[in-house]
Image: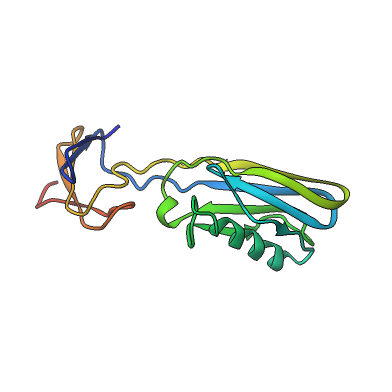
Amino acid sequence: MPVIEGSGGMLSGAGAPGAGTSEVQTLTIGGTPTGGTFQLAFEGLTTAAIPWSNVNATLIAAIDAALEALASIGTGNVVVAVGTMTAGIGTATITFGGSLAAKAVATIAVANNSLTGTSPTLAVAETTPGVDAAGRGAAKGTLYTDVTNGVLYISTAAAPTPTWVKVGLQS
């Protein structure tokens, strides 16, 4: 695990700074909903009521907009897409990006299920666990020492997802 030594200074760890993995979660809508709303929660904040729709594109857009409206997520930090959804029933994937990319995040929770119809259900599961990128959050100009291979890197881009470049002509 990298150790930060001072403000914008040095990181050191075993191996080259990695890209990490962005988390993917799956929202499953089951039963036979015919209407109503639901709410999702992330890191202590709850979305506005999300209206269910049997039009996949409408439902996906509503889920995406509701999640991005949360201060704990923000605009551009998730992408919601149809998984196995047909007429508003099935799965939608939620992929974290932007400032939440290459990072382990909390699992979204179902805060309220006010769907109508025959036994409508909602569940969220982690599909692809997020993995924090080595050196994630490092400021531009921060140095990273790969102590295993004796290679020095410098961050050429701003946090939260810096770009790491080898310093000089190292092998």
Q: Quadrant of the N terminus?
A: top left
Tell me where residue 67 appears, x and y as whole percent: 58, 56
**Left or right placement of residue 93 versus residue 56 in this view:** left
**Left or right placement of residue 68 versus residue 55 in this view:** left
**Left or right placement of residue 97 versus residue 49 in this view:** left
Which is nearer the eye, 152 or 116? 116
**Left or right placement of residue 30 versus residue 139 in this view:** right
Numbered marks: total: 0
In percent of the image, x 76 and y 55: which residue is there? 37
Which is nearer the eye, 28 or 53? 53
Tell me where residue 117 appears, x and y as whole percent: 88, 52
| Quarter of the view holding residue 4 | top left
Instruction: State the colouring used for the structure image.
Output: rainbow
Which is nearer the eye, 38 or 118? 38
In percent of the image, x 48 and y 42: which residue is there? 105
Tell me where residue 31 appears, x and y as whole percent: 84, 47
In percent of the image, x 50 and y 53: which residue is there? 73
| Quarter of the view holding residue 84 | bottom right
Tell me where residue 59 appears, x and y as whole percent: 70, 63
Which is nearer the eye, 14 or 110? 110
Give the residue furthest to the right.
Answer: 118
